[in-house]
Image (spheres, helix red, strand yellow):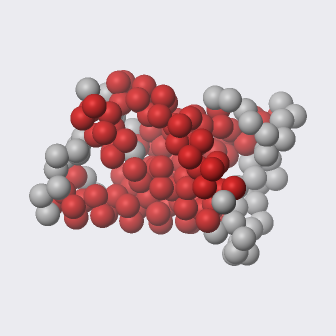
Amino acid sequence: MFLFILQSLYFFLPAFMARIIPSFFSKISLGDKHLHPKIMISPKELVLATLTSTLVFILQMVAYRAGFQSITLIDYAGFTPLLGVLMGVGVIAGNALKNYYKQKDGISLNSNWLPWDSWGYVFGAILFSFLEYVPDVSVVVILLVASPLFELVLGFVRKK
């Protein structure tokens, strides 16, 4: 069971990284105008998340071809970097949808909205990845359970 959890988390690593990397660039002003006033996502976040997830997925493909296959959920040789692109765009789409509903309900973007703050990007990345790969339901459940823990770590990192 532990190996399956590890495989699920490794599979989702491009999306996790797409979620975290744009926050490190929040102080740099590059295309910070939002794509739409109700979704509060900038082109910078979209580009950074997509590039990050794609690069991480390519690194996973290279590692797989080099023999690192013990914790892989999928056969990376059978996929193109498009899966990484889809995960990155899905992370942003999930966050955008979550932000839209947060504003619609009158909730501040900086306040906690559990569990949706940690699930929005997961649903987005998984739904977009369906175009290339449909994970087992148990993988999705593992990711939904793990994402709040990931958000706690991310919140700690952001405060430092």
Question: Which quadrant holds residue 157?
Answer: bottom right
Residue 134 rendering spot, x and y as whole percentages: 33, 34
Residue 145 rendering spot, x and y as whole percentages: 48, 28
Question: Which quadrant holds residue 142?
Answer: top left
Residue 22 falls left or right of residue 122 = right
Residue 156 falls left or right of residue 58 = right
| Residue 104 visible, this orientation | yes
Q: Classify the position of the C terminus by image quarter.
A: bottom right
- Could you tell me which residue is drawn at 65 percent across and 32 percent down? 116
Residue 118 rendering spot, x and y as whole percentages: 60, 37
When the figure is inspected, residue 54 is found, relative to residue 74, above or below; the finding is below
Residue 129 rendering spot, x and y as whole percentages: 40, 43
Q: Nearer the viewer, residue 90 or 146?
A: 146
Residue 154 falls left or right of residue 97 = left
Q: Classify the position of the N terminus by image quarter.
A: top left
Q: Nearer the viewer, residue 60 or 130?
A: 60
- Could you tell me which residue is drawn at 44 percent across and 58 percent down? 53
- Could you tell me which residue is drawn at 74 percent across and 36 percent down? 112
